[in-house]
Image: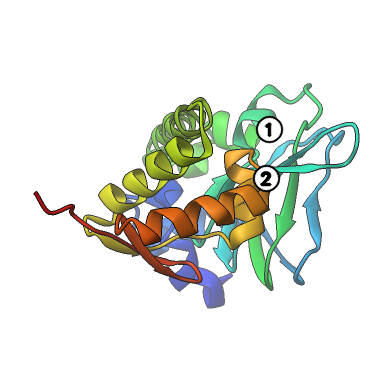
Amino acid sequence: MKKYLHLIRNSPLFSGMTDNEILSILDCMNGTVKRYQKDAVILRSGDIVHNVGIVLSGNVHIVKEDFWENDNILTCLGSGQIFAEAYACLGTERLEINVIAKERTDVLFINVNKIMNVCTSACEFHSVLIRNLLWSLAEKNLVLTKRIEHTSKRSIREKLLSYLSEQSKKARSPEFEIPFNRQQLADYLSVDRSAMSNELSKLRNEGLIDFEKNKFKLNELSA
């Protein structure tokens, strides 16, 4: 586990812990690391899970599939971020999402019951781990709320501007990169790709934005 320590410490789940504390609690909880190749299914809809997944390296998409197998990207997660925590905490609800590796990805799994049930060997910092898990759940709720805010807009133009504006604020710069390609962005915003691409071109022609692949720049309009 030591070879992954530089990646594990990036996770907010272990915020406030020393390296020795992290190694101690992972040993206590029998944390395991698995590697997935690009497009591999990490977790599948219908599964019942008891483990929290932590992305150590790579990138994963949380995807919801409809009856006709159309994918709807809920969010994109990178190094340090966690997934399946809500389902793991419940322990009885079947997954309604797929977790897909979008590149070669290493994931650390920890049984949530070992997090929630304090043991004598980890009592000094176990409460920190529980606090961090609750913080992560709250943050995830905000992320999903933001997506609802974008997708609830009436037009594709409004959805794009809402999402791009939020990404600019997140980067604290008018220039930023988004974690999606065109199809993934269309899925995330629940719009048709061709119609979205046409709208992006219109926004660029109007001088509102510039872009190259997943790099965007928002422009201020002159008086």
Q: Is residue 165 visible?
A: yes
Q: Amino acid at mark 1?
A: Ala
Q: Amino acid at mark 2?
A: Asp
SS under mark 2: loop
Which residue in the protein does label 1 denote? 88
User: Is residue 181 found left or right of 97 in the rendered image?
Assistant: left
Q: Is residue 80 visible?
A: no
User: Is residue 15 found left or right of 113 in the rendered image?
Assistant: left
Which residue in the protein does label 2 denote? 192
Q: Position of residue 122 (x, y in %)?
A: 47, 43
User: Is residue 27 found left or right of 171 in the rendered image?
Assistant: right
The image quarter containing residue 129 is top left
The image quarter containing residue 6 is bottom left
The image quarter containing residue 212 is bottom left
Whether 188 is drawn above or below 87: the answer is below
On the rendered image, what quadrant is the N terminus found in?
Answer: bottom right
Residue shown at the point (68%, 30%) measured from the top left = 87
Sequence-wise, which precedes: disc 2 or disc 1?
Answer: 1
Residue shown at the point (30%, 53%) measured from the top left = 168
Q: Position of residue 208 (x, y in %)?
A: 30, 54
Q: Residues within 10 Å of mark 2 (few under 14, many from 20)?
A: few
Q: Nearer the viewer, mark 2 or mark 1?
A: 2
Identity of the residue furthest to the left in this view: 223
Judging depth in this view, the residue of 64 and 105 nearest the camera is 64
Judging depth in this view, the residue of 21 and 164 nearest the camera is 164
